[in-house]
Image (spheres, rainbow, N blue to C red):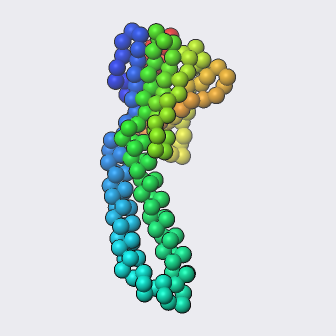
Amino acid sequence: MLKVIKQNDRQLTLEDKRPIAGGIALIFVLISLFGLINLLIQVIRVFDTYIRADNGLLWFITVSIFVTLAFGFVLLGISAALHFLIGSTCMIDKDAETITLQQVNLFRTTSRQYSIYSVSYIDIKQNDEVHAFGVFFVLRDGSQVPLASYHQQDEEVMLDTVQRLRTFLR
């Protein structure tokens, strides 16, 4: 949930971190890592027996697929945990006339900068299928820059944050 962490007359900093979701993602990473290590130990124990059998190539291909899937789940979990724990930051600086968005994408942090004057308005979109709101900067060229998402239960907090953003950008 996007929260104001610093505000004065010239700067506004908002942060979107989800530590509970990050903790849950870390638990799933540990479970996936345990499964991967367990699978590798079992494969090492029986490797000689099965690789020399008549269907050794089929066994090797099957094990390779499962090891690759388990490794993929570990990487996906690490990526999700980083996304939730590090989160994203939006810094609006009236002196520099910029809006800077820092977000975690896969395994690296990206930073994008926009001119304050390129923002036409702040839009809120409701998605009833997932019971969530999306907050976007709509630029003058019509493109939308996603800022945050809120669960429908947090509608009042979202409206308050969006109002503070709109007031600050005036």
The structure residue drawn at horizontal position 36% and vertical position 16%, both measured from the top left corner, is 7
Q: What is the tally of numbered marks visible in this picture?
A: 0
On the rendered image, what quadrant is the N terminus found in?
Answer: top left
| Above-or-below relation of 100 to 41 | above
Classify residue 141 by image quadrant.
top right
Residue 154 visible within the image: no
| Above-or-below relation of 128 to 120 | below
Residue 76 visible within the image: yes
Q: Position of residue 165 (x, y in %)?
A: 46, 19
| Above-or-below relation of 138 to 58 | above
Residue closer to the observer: 154 or 34: 34
Classify residue 71 by image quadrant.
bottom left
Classify residue 155 by image quadrant.
top left
Q: Position of residue 74 (x, y in %)?
A: 42, 57
Residue closer to the observer: 98 or 14: 98
The structure residue drawn at horizontal position 54% and vertical position 46%, both measured from the top left corner, is 129
Q: Position of residue 152 (x, y in %)?
A: 44, 38
The structure residue drawn at horizontal position 51% and vertical position 17%, both measured from the top left corner, is 98
